[in-house]
Image (cartoon, grey):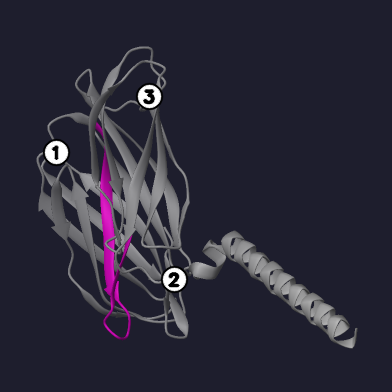
Amino acid sequence: MLLAVPAHAGVISIQTELTPIYDGKVFTLHATVINRGDEAAHDVSVAAELAGAVSHSAEVAFLGPNESQSLELAQEVAVSKHGEYPVVVTVHYTDANHHPFSAISVAPLIYGDSKPSRIEASVSNLELSDSSGLLNLTSRNLDGKPEEISVRLITPKELSVSGFIGRFTLDGGAAEDFRIPVNNISANPGSSYLVYALVEYEEGGLHYFTAANAYVSVILDPGFVKTHRMLLISLWLLLAAVFIYSNVRYFWWSGKASVSVNT
């Protein structure tokens, strides 16, 4: 997972390599955090969520360009059913001015028996030029029978969204579309963030999940001129027509008056 964040003259680009392990009692995550950018990251730490339980690693004070650091965390977690689960990982860090940033990724964890999910999900990329935008999410049931599913949208802390969409029944062979508001909290123009949609359900004593990801790119506000370009062009043409008409009338009346005086 890559995240590029402009910071002064350089960028901080975070990549993660994740190995989640669960033995039925203790959840362990081995994470390698790599800075692929050309500026150092500071105060780097990892948080991981499994089945609603959040674990935290120790903090690394400095991670220079092209440097990597191994971080580990462990915590007792109660997982009731076998199957496949999402591990949501957030890397927290700051730039040289102590501005906070985050990068998220999702790693699959298989506990005991598991089967592939029969629910598909897809998310479209989004460009944010203003403070908010709408993200398109589609979920599809490939099975012939209905499934009660839950859907979450996971974002870094620079963005805000209703993280838990809800739980609903998706009929066999049916698809459901969502348009989800995404708000810019503290993301800088030029940044690009991965977001994840997680679809989970349970059937036959097993837990299933599928993930889809997309990029939310923050671009410069096009401003009033670009946003209202056609309106401004129309107003300019109208003013130009009024100006030409006024001048034509002025010269016409001036010429007519001159002829009258000479006569």
Mark 2 lies on a secondary structure that is: loop
Amino acid type indicated by mark 2 = Pro
Task: Say if 3 sits above or below 141 in the image.
Answer: below
Q: Which residue does the image show at 60% across and 65% down from the upper left? A: 235
Q: Answer with mark 1 or mark 2, whichever residue precedes in sequence.
A: 1
In this picture, which residue range is highlighted in magenta?
83-103
Q: Secondary structure at mark 1?
A: loop
- Magenta region includes residue 78: no
Mark 3 sits on what residue?
Answer: 118
Q: Quadrant of residue 205?
A: top left
Disc 2 designates what residue?
A: 189
Q: Which residue lies at the image location 59% right of the left edge and 66% below the top edge?
A: 232
The N terminus, quarter of image: bottom left
Q: Disc 1 designates what residue?
A: 24
Report whether 41 appears left or right of 232. left
Residue drawn at x 11%, y 45% is: 77
Q: Residue 47 at what x, y percent from top left?
A: 21, 60
Q: How many marks?
A: 3
